[in-house]
């Protein structure tokens, strides 16, 4: 122990004593992540103060680690003051360590609720305004942040880090929807950090995929391609994020005018989707499903000018047709833009203008898709069509700032 290899002590305590790294961390007053890092052979404890803390918590005699004897070593009934170590004392020490470390102010129910809250936000993403959803997301993030100061087990800590990362991810996504890119950058950075702390490559892949989408929205198509490929490299094979990253890659190819690569990406997405098991929550933003594939195909083909985009767009519009008392969904609004674009490309001008008008006036085109509406308006203006002035006015009304969420 003179080389201060506490990592070996921690591994042995867990293996033979059944003491978790979280329990050791709580008893020694160090972070659980640090305990795990030391146990994996990375780093050393170098400060005398921390050595003393570990020695006291684990009852390691000072002489074994090159520090002065600890007070408890000479106390009556201690290991150092008795001819041999009492089994009873060892057991009591272990029980006390377990008692101190098992105490948690978080608990299973709290974490379950936070995880369910994230799923609810992901389900509501497609139908609720980003500003409204951001208010809820911020509340859950604030609560999760508060829990980091509470006592918890190692397993609870990892779950908390994971759900906080997911909440940061959807918060950043909403900020992109609202065109707040500085806030989105901060949120994505936090989500990546938390994904790495929790050792969740799938979550990190979602962060890169989301950033790829942002690059697409901002017109940086090569950056979108790079980020999509980074997401694919991290994503578990066949997972929703692997499919979505492939879809973003195809979008980037389409905007870069690379039809061969675009069609290859579309084919891969369709192949992946055909092997997906059924999902009970297809509306979940982070669960890929055949309906999302249809929407993606409509958009991507419309950017290539492929007339096949029309059938895909009409299928999405028909499937998402709102009830009389419901608003158009954001995905349906985008499908209307897809249809308008392909109709314009093939000179079906009257229907193209009417379709674009429905999308823009619906109020369901998110700020992150305003550029798509503007692209269509500018095309109609360039054609000198009589509907141009009306559509321009509708577009200006669409992008007018509304009351901000705080």
Image (cartoon, rainbow, N blue to C red):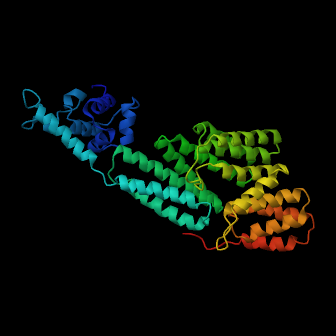
Residue 143 position, x and y percent, is 42, 60
In the rendered view, tell whether residue 199 sits above or below residue 281.
Answer: above
**Quadrant in the rendering for residue 266:** top right
Task: Work out whether residue 217 can be spotted.
Answer: yes
Judge whether 281 appears above or below 394 on screen. Answer: above
Task: Judge by depth and name the residue closer to the eye, 361 or 25.
Answer: 361
Residue 145 found in image quarter: bottom left
Residue 267: horizontal and vertical position, in percent? 74, 40
> Image quadrant for the C terminus?
bottom right
Q: Residue at x 90, y 61 (%)?
A: 348
Residue 334 visible here: no
Left or right, 380 with reference to 45: right
User: Tag count in the figure?
Assistant: 0
Say which residue appears at 86% left-offset and 65% top-offset. 351
101 horizontally vs 224: left or right: left
Q: Give the image location of residue 206, x and y in percent.
A: 59, 47
Provide residue 391's location: percent of width, then percent of height: 82, 71
Is 84 located above or below residue 151 in the figure?
above
Q: Quadrant of the N terminus?
A: top left
Q: Which one is in front, 351 or 185?
A: 351
């Amino acid at each position: 122990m003179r080389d201060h290899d506490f990592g070996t002590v921690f591994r042995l305590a867990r293996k033979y004593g059944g003491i978790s790294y979280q329990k050791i961390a709580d008893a020694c007053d160090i972070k659980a992540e640090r305990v795990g890092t030391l146990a994996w052979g990375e780093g050393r404890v170098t400060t005398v103060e921390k050595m003393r803390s570990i020695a006291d918590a684990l009852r390691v005699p000072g002489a074994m680690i090159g520090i002065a004897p600890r007070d408890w070593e000479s106390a009556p009934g201690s290991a150092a003051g008795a001819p041999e170590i009492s089994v009873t004392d060892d057991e009591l020490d272990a029980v006390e360590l377990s008692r101190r470390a098992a105490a948690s102010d978080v608990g299973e129910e709290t974490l379950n609720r936070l995880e369910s809250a994230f799923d609810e936000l992901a389900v509501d993403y497609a139908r609720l305004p980003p500003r409204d959803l951001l208010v809820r997301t911020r509340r859950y993030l604030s609560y999760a942040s508060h829990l980091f100061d509470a006592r918890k087990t190692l397993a609870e800590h990892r779950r908390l880090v994971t759900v906080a990362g997911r909440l940061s991810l959807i918060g950043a996504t909403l900020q992109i929807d609202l065109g707040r890119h500085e806030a989105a950058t901060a949120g994505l950075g936090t989500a990546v950090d938390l994904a790495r702390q929790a050792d969740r490559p799938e979550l990190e892949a979602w962060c890169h995929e989301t950033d790829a989408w942002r690059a697409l929205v901002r017109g940086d198509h090569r950056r979108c391609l790079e980020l999509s490929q980074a997401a694919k490299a991290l994503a578990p094979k066949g997972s929703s994020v692997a499919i979505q990253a492939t879809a973003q890659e195809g979008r980037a190819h389409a905007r870069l005018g690379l039809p061969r690569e675009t069609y290859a990406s579309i084919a891969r997405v369709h192949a992946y989707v055909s092997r997906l098991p059924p999902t009970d929550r297809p509306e979940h933003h982070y669960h890929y499903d055949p309906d999302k594939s249809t929407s993606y195909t409509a958009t991507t083909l419309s950017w290539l000018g492929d007339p096949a985009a029309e059938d895909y767009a009409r299928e999405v519009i028909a499937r998402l047709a709102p009830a009389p008392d419901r608003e158009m969904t954001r995905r349906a609004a985008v499908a209307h833009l897809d249809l308008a674009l392909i109709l314009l490309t093939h000179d079906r001008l009257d229907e193209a203008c009417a379709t674009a008008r429905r999308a823009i006036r619906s109020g369901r085109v998110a700020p992150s898709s305003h550029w798509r509406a503007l692209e269509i308006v500018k095309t109609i203006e360039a054609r000198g069509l009589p509907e141009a002035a009306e559509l321009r006015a509708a577009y200006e009304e669409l992008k007018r700032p509304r009351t901000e969420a705080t």
